[in-house]
Image: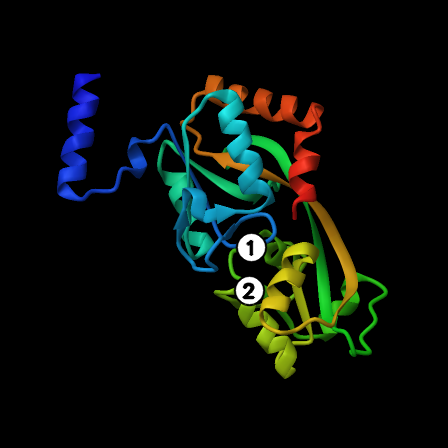
Amino acid sequence: MFLLRFVTILALACGLSLARAEPLVLLTENLPPFNMSVAGTNYARDDGVTGISSDILRAVCERAQVQCQQILRFPWQRVYQQTLDDAGYGLFSTARTAEREGLFKWVGPIARNEWVLFSKGDSSIQLNSLDDARRYRIGGYKGDAKTQFLLDRGLEVQTALRDSENVKKLERGQIDLWVTSNQAGRFVARQEGLENLKVVQNLHTADLYLALNLQTPDELVQKLQSALDSLRAEGALRSIEARY
């Protein structure tokens, strides 16, 4: 205990980050309404991070009596790789895909995410199947599971480092379709001044999880899962979702 306090004091004196000193550092990105910066910035921590998943995980950590720090950073690929590489880190809100299954330990689901293809509201585009989308220019978020979903099926996707760039491309006619989340996509589009969107294809409904580095102890994973399950049974998750 004395050694831990000494290291903490030394780190503070030197101005070093204490993120790694926390039992769990939970990384995320701006994906409203699931996780987002209160100030609308690309960096936030702790109370500066809000959203459905963020609030749920705060409640889970409190119930499990696990000290958790939340940090929001950009871009997604950076926080994804850090969680893969470094013990003590988790990542939310993460789609649990077959490709990712063995890369992390999982707690969830914490929320549900509807994957869609949007066009502008006044577009005449109609799709009878996903295969019909091959005729159109599609924009997506680089490194995102929804983009990968289309790439895995042989569709071409123009990727952007910020999903807001796809809103601007759609509005300017530089892309015809935008692969995104129904909930998050509409939120981002409103921020960019685009209200009129049309779902032309429902792709998938994905459960969102907390993905933990593989070195996370199984006992800790189970403690968090049990806390989540009990909160869900009590109706606490529905109450949190209703706030957004």
Horizontal and vertical percent for residue 29?
48, 51
Q: Secondary structure at mark 1?
A: loop
Instruction: Looking at the picture, tell me which residue is in the foreground, 17 or 129.
Output: 17
Q: Amino acid at mark 1?
A: Asp
Q: CA distance from mark 2 to mark 1?
A: 10 Å
* Residue for point 52% across, 42% down: 92
Q: Residue furthest right?
A: 128
First of labels 2, 1 by sequence position: 1
| Rendered view: 184 above or below 98 | below
* Residue for point 51% across, 54% down: 30
Q: Is residue 91 visible?
A: yes
Left or right, residue 147 beside residue 76: right
Q: Quadrant of residue 190?
A: bottom right
Q: Quadrant of residue 130?
A: bottom right
Left or right, residue 233 beside residue 85: right
- Colouring rule applied to residues: rainbow
Q: Secondary structure at mark 2?
A: helix
How many numbered marks appear?
Answer: 2
Q: Is residue 99 visible?
A: no
The residue that disc 1 covers is 144
Q: Amino acid at mark 2?
A: Asp
| Rendered view: 160 above or below 171 | above
| Rendered view: 184 above or below 70 | below
The residue that disc 2 covers is 163
Disc 2 to disc 1: CB gap under 8 Å: yes
The local crowd at label 2, few if under 14, some if 14 to 19, many if 20 or more residues have their Cα within 10 Å, is many
